[in-house]
Image (cartoon, grey):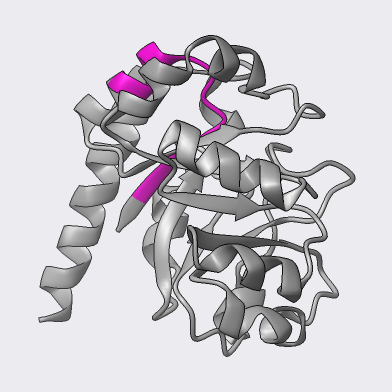
């Protein structure tokens, strides 16, 4: 089970995440977010490029040329498209970088119909809670909708996941669940994570999944 910590806004916290064994960090490269990393990415582009952890750039309806330029400049592992990007937009970027297409899920969402046009043009999906904003709401959606969906692409599970959700994660099963994505419920303020809480969560996440596997055998 992979872990992504999204919405980081400092090199120091990215390096700490790398030390802890976090798999991915998310940089919100969208000016409309209160967790926007744009102020520090511009000032520390060279340092950011050298950070060892896998970096995912998070975008909302951004110009494709800007996304491609950032991919090179910041050495991004993948880009997470959190807006209304079309399948054609995703296809145009995919030969340059791994594509994670985010989908916002509500109580009435037909997940299979929603993702179908994107299946051939993305590397991963991400499922988040449908709100007026683009992520970081601290609110969760009904994971039973995902358990019933016939999604057959690896996906990131997001949306209001907090330190107290380990049992919920342990009891959730989908064969294509790839990564847990955490953000606002681990913060001391927007864009600043409590890395001690992240460390505990990561340790317990790994222990719970290891135990789960052992019990299956």
Which of the 4 image quadrants contains residue 190?
top right
Q: Nearer the viewer, residue 192 or 161?
A: 192
Number of marks:
0
Identify the residue at horizontal 45%, vertical 68% (top origin): 172
- Relative to 47, residue 102 above or below: below
Residue at image point 11% right, 70% down: 214
Q: Quadrant of the C terminus?
A: bottom left
Looking at the picture, how far across and down is residue 200, in whole percent?
Answer: 29, 30
Q: Determine whether, in the image, residue 166 is placed left or right of residue 158.
A: left
Is residue 60 rendered to the left or right of residue 78? right
Q: Which quadrant would residue 40 be assigned to in this image?
A: top right
Compared with 40, 113 (above or below) is: below
Residue 55 seen in the figure: yes
Seen at 16% across and 60% down, the residue is: 210
Name the residue: 20% across, 26% down: 19
Residue 167, image quadrant: bottom left
Which image quarter holds the N terminus?
bottom left
**Residue 170, placed above or below residue 150:** above
| Residue 160 seen in the current view | no
Q: Nearer the viewer, residue 44 or 24?
A: 44
Look at the image and give the residue range highlighted in magenta: 3-15
Residue 13: horizontal and vertical position, in percent? 39, 17
**Is residue 131 a member of the stretch shown in magenta?**
no
**Image height check: is 185 above or below 78?**
above
- Pinpoint residue 184: horizontal percent, then vertical percent: 61, 30
* Magenta stretch holds residue 9: yes
Relative to 3, is 42 on the left or the right? right
List x then y, in percent, for residue 99: 54, 62
């Amino acid at each position: 089970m992979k872990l992504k910590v999204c919405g980081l806004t400092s090199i120091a916290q990215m390096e700490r995440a790398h030390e802890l064994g976090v798999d991915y960090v998310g940089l919100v490269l969208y000016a409309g977010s209160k967790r926007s990393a744009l102020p520090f990415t511009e000032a520390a582009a060279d340092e950011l490029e050298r950070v060892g952890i896998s970096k995912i750039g998070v975008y909302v309806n951004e110009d494709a040329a800007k996304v491609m330029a950032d991919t090179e400049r910041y050495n991004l592992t993948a880009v997470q498209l959190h807006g209304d990007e079309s399948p054609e937009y995703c296809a145009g970027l995919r030969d340059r970088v791994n594509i994670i297409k985010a989908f916002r899920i509500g109580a009435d969402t037909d997940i299979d119909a929603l993702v179908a046009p994107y299946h051939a043009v993305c590397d991963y999906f991400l499922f988040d809670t449908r709100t007026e904003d683009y992520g970081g709401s601290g609110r969760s959606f009904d994971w039973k909708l995902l358990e019933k969906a016939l999604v057959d692409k690896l996906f990131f599970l997001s949306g209001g996941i907090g330190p107290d959700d380990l049992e919920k994660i342990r009891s959730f099963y989908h064969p294509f669940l790839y990564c847990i994505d955490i953000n606002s419920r681990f913060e001391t303020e927007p864009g600043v994570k409590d890395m001690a809480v992240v460390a505990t969560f990561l340790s317990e996440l790994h222990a719970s999944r290891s135990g789960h596997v052992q019990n299956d055998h």
